[in-house]
Amino acid sequence: MTPGTSTGRLAERVAVVTGAAGGIGEATARLLAHEGASVVLADYMGNRVADHAADLRNAGYNAVGVATDVRDLHQVRRAIETATDHFGRLDILHNNVGVNFHNLIGDASEEHFLECLNINLLSVYRGCHVAAPIMTIQGSGSIVNTSSVQGLMGFRTYAAYATAKAGILGLTRQMAVDYGPSGIRVNAVLPGAVDTPMWRAEVATTADYAAEIEASAQRIPLQRIGTPEDIAQAVLYLASDESSFVTGQQLVVDGGLSIAGSRPNEP
């Protein structure tokens, strides 16, 4: 199958997006396809990524959905090799899986802490571990890792999650140094409060959901909650040739939250 379309900022590129069943991953996969890339959508919710891929194909784009548990290296390898098998190459990897874990370090069991690292940090290792040799042979590639402003700031009860997201930043910088000579760029995008299913689950525990959204927006200088499309546009920039001299960087997309601060118990 011929990679991508002949038009768009990612014409004839091939991308793999993990966590693509909804939220940031789905928005990114759709945007990359619209910009000309052939896209493999990977997520443990296999039916949903299959449906999203079918929607994209019906709209004239190249897309494949692959059921993928990012805790399993073999499944991550299968998802990435789907790109090379179907489209002949791998130009873009967006490591995007994330799950919130709430705990104080004194309350978190070792099992709970390690599971958070496994899903949020080791999934990035697995994707990079498989993709880097493929991109090295090609002599080019762009890896975009989803971290979080929680990798930069302290928020109460996010010990494991913040550790994982900070670890992604360290891995991103190190890979940029190690793989720059091979033509591979590695960057991270750091979302703040974004209206995704995961974020909605965080605030849905309050009695007045609409009021909580409004209160959260008021603590952000731009006075709104981010959208998945806001983050997708940042990923597109880092994946495209427009950022050809950018590597090892962390692009914060949070409406100013991280410079304004927040309440100590703000999620």
Image (cartoon, rainbow, N blue to C red):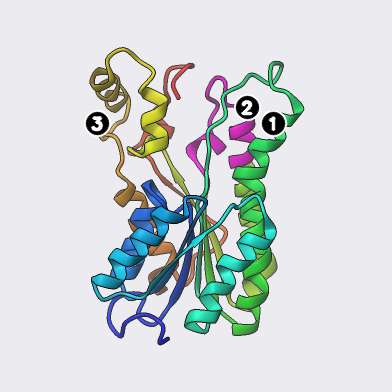
- Most distant residue in the front direction: 47
Indicate which disc residue 159 carries: 2
Q: Residues within 10 Å of mark 1 (few under 14, many from 20)?
A: many
Q: Earlier in the sequence, mark 1 or mark 3?
A: 1
Q: Position of residue 159 (x, y in %)?
A: 63, 27
Q: Quadrant of residue 191?
A: top left
Question: Is there a contact, CB below 8 Å, between mark 2 and mark 1?
Answer: yes
Q: Is residue 174 above or below residue 227?
A: below
Q: Nearer the viewer, mark 2 or mark 3?
A: 2
Determine the residue positioned at 26% across, 76% down.
60
Helix, strand or loop at label 1? It is: helix
Determine the residue positioned at 57% across, 59% down.
248
Indicate which disc residue 158 carries: none
Q: Is residue 123 above or below residue 98?
A: below
Q: Quadrant of residue 192?
A: top left
Looking at the image, residue 163 sits to the left or right of residue 100; the answer is right
Helix, strand or loop at label 2? It is: helix
In this figure, which residue is indicated by the disc labeled 1?
113
In the image, the segment drawn in magenta is: 147-165
Q: Quadrant of residue 104?
A: top right
| Magenta stretch: includes residue 155 | yes
Q: Earlier in the sequence, mark 2 or mark 3?
A: 2
Determine the residue positioned at 41% across, 51% down.
21
Q: Is residue 174 visible?
A: no
Looking at the image, residue 41 sits to the left or right of residue 32; the answer is right
Give the CA distance from mark 2 to mark 1.
8 Å
Q: Amino acid at mark 1?
A: Phe
Q: Position of residue 101 (x, y in %)?
A: 57, 29
